[in-house]
Amino acid sequence: MNNEHSWVSCSRAHKNHDKNPWLLLFISILEAVRGVAKMDDFENSYKDAVEAGQRNLRASKLLSNWCFHAEFVRSPGRGMIEAETNLPIGHMGVQCKFSKMNSMQAWLLEDAAYDFYKNNCKNCDKRVPVGIPNIMDFIGPREKVAENRRRVRQEEEALRKQKQSHRQDERSKLRYKLTLEETFVLDLLDELDREGVARDDPRLEELANLAPETFSRKIVQQLLPIVLNENLPYSIPAAKAMLKASLEPDEKVSVAVRLISSYEMSSAAIDVILSGAEKLSNNDLRMIVHRFVSIALEPPPSSSFGRNHRVIINAVPFHSLFQKRYSEICGEIDLLLNDTNPGAIGGGVAIILASDNAELLKKHARKIISTLMRRRTLLPSERRDSSAIYYLREAASKLLEIFPDLADTIIQSYLADNDSVGREEASKIYRSVLKSNYREVAKIGDAQRIAFKRLLWIAMQTPEDGMSDAGQFFRHSWDEFSKLGSEFFYELVGAAATLSQRYEDVDAERPLEFSSEVLEEMDRRNRRASIENLQAALIEWAAIGAKSKGREGVEDFLKLYRNLPQEQAQMRGKMISHFSKLLSGVESITLVLSDWYRALMDESAVVRCSAVQAWEKVPYALVKNFPDLFLESISVLLADPYVIVHRAAVRTLRHRPFPKEKRNFINGGLWNLVLHYSKKGKQEEFVVDCLDALVFLCLSPEEKKGSIGSFISGILIDLEGHALYHAIDRLHYGFEDVPGFVKVALKSIQSGYTRSISIDDCASVILKTSHFELKGCVDEMRNAFFSLKPFKPNNFFESLLYSAALSKAGEYAVVSTCLRELITSIPAEARNEQWRLEVDLVATASDIENAIETGNELGELIESWGKTVINLECENEERSKLRNIPPSFFFED
């Protein structure tokens, strides 16, 4: 695929690959992401990935020609772009059987190959050439660049030493003209002007504090050129020291400017700058402004990466300078905002933010918002971590907070462009003012009301888009904004009601031209789910708002619910599912109970399902206040003929259990479901949910450890694939003492489905199982061990797992037999020496345990153990010295 025209190529693929549904799915995802601008730099990232894959494909061919023994390795997994293009995209490296050190896996195989070449291949006498061209095609130019860099550094080093010698000669001539005290400064300079002196050496500054008179005019004339024009290790300490000396006013300002330009924000330098602000040239003023702004604002998140200290914010210096050079700084802002360079625009906006001047912010309001909402055109090269975009968003948010009507008017005017990026930026601006601290009442003002209303409107324009900022805001209800939910109660319910029609209209819309029937259905399902989720979220907001008004709000919510037509099952279901959000005490339970009870018995399966799901959100403190009749109604739904209903009931009970004294209501229903779904042909993951609820709610510890527990393990061991993985993932915390459950884990750990995800939970079960249980599954553990053939280093942990379990079962001879066979299967190569020694150590330990158990002689085994330990320590020490960082991380030489 051509890098410069990747999207065009994707479009052409519609015609050329119309029989490949996975290609069409991949293209539809790419175009959906591009169309709604979910990731600003997705297209660039896609191109970068394809380019990297093309380079890796070529590098792998060159590597295969380089040496017969060179092996290409890569991290597991296969991404969508790689699956579509068949290009090697991911982290990859190089290894060889003659080398203990592999290359570090890198995004570009060229980097890993160069690393391996420098550390292993450069002087290797075992290389077997295969053909040409080979990796020297990219290693040769790198070696030349590295050689040139070494030569340049040597020339720079020679020039540095020449200047150092010249400075020493000057100080020697000056020494005869100075007093004894003044020569102390020269002595210190001679010491500092050597190799390996730290740049923050404090001795010059300390001398200036103790004896400022030693920095006479002659010393100042000697140091001033070094401070202003040189970048020596002691230039900055010398500048700090000179601020303590008797300098001319212009000289003192110049030294302070030098310090500030080097990001040395000392209070002395700042005081000098502010006291001599009128003496600053335009260039110096511009630089000082940006330095002061950098400490007046929180830095963008992208610039905080790798920083190990917190930036101290101090806006006082900038505010003082702003007052003294107001007109010049305002002129600088105008110039920066009218520039086309993103960095200049971001710098101008940062100055406005640092000034904390509402009128200045208002003056540039249209420029700030227009640049942000039209950034697809005005800032096309800026990615999502851009500091310019960060400051523009901060300024736009501040505008909306201070001047809500003005900012809203400007935002709405630019929404007329109908640009997807502009819509997302508008959503971000509105959402930025709707923030609060957890469990604290949020500030509600004009800005928040406008933002809430606009976000609701934006979310309703594209309800199928589940990832939009507006949709994401409403999909997570906040109790802190319950006042807004109350004020916009009818708007929220009305919007939710209109979504029912949108939900039904999805099937009637014209499908994508290039989609197959499978993709059409997948697309419709996703869009329906997004609309349904938004509808539920809006009703939840309304319920939270109604609850905040007390009895009046709850009655308003119930009144709307009762007035819904009977045929609007979806809307009724969504409202009933949030009845629990209305509960605040016994009075609110009394208000909703009759409607909730009728919903549990409703003729619509959707409403019954929603009614039982509402139980999941009931506050724990209120569960005991529900009458038996209501609880019995929930238990009846476990026998509901509709799958959607009884499954919803089980999953709800798993998250909000019954009171202990009432659990007899659900015991029979859960057992019936377990027996039904455990039949042949019906085994699926839902039986795991049923067992989870049954064991947690209805079985005593004694029943779990007895014959009932064995019966449950018998059900689980018949599961396959995802259902088997789900059983271990869901049940491993509370089933360690269930008889036979370890056999379920041993079956799951050998399942291809489980191994494609994670075997950690299976390992946890095996390690926690008792000695008695493990004794009963020795054959299963031995089979699991040998199922790892052919043995690989990345399976060593798993082999140790089975060895530990067999040892716990007392089967030391079996452990020794398994590990000795493992040792014989490991190739006797240098790179495998550590692995062989580790396996040998564990095998010897098993032999010792077996000898102790059988009463055999231990002398030779203990001696062998000691020798293996010494050899392993030597091997680890040798490996610790091997560098494992690609040279491209630093310099390539």
Image (tube, grey):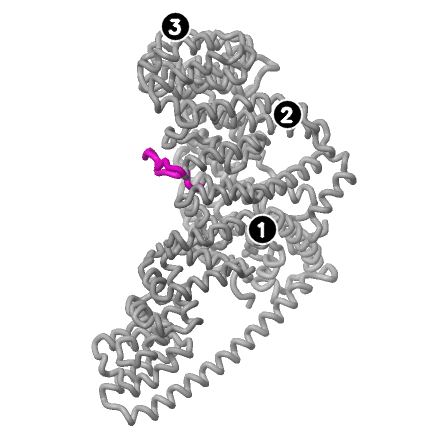
Q: Which mark is residue 828?
A: 1
Q: Residue 415 appears at what percent x and percent y?
A: 56, 42
Of the image marks 2 and 1, the number of the one nearer the N terminus? 2
Between the residue at mark 3 and the residue at mark 1, the CA separation in whole angstroms equals: 73 Å
Q: Which residues are magenta?
A: 432-446
Between the residue at mark 2 and the residue at mark 3, the CA separation in whole angstroms equals: 40 Å
Q: Residue at x 23, y 79 (%)?
A: 212
The amino acid sitting under disc 1 is: Ala
Q: Is residue 801 left or right of residue 821?
A: left
Q: Residue 317 appears at what percent x and percent y?
A: 32, 62
Question: Which SS type dominates the magenta stretch?
Answer: loop
The amino acid sitting under disc 3 is: Leu
Of the image marks 2 and 3, the number of the one nearer the N terminus? 2
Q: Which mark is residue 506?
A: 2
Q: Residue 382 appears at what percent x and percent y?
A: 55, 53
Callout 2 crowding tier (Cα within 10 Å): few <14, some 14–19, many ≥20: some
Callout 1 crowding tier (Cα within 10 Å): few <14, some 14–19, many ≥20: few
Q: Residue at x 44, y 38 (%)?
A: 846
The mark lying in front, picked from 3 and 1, is: 3
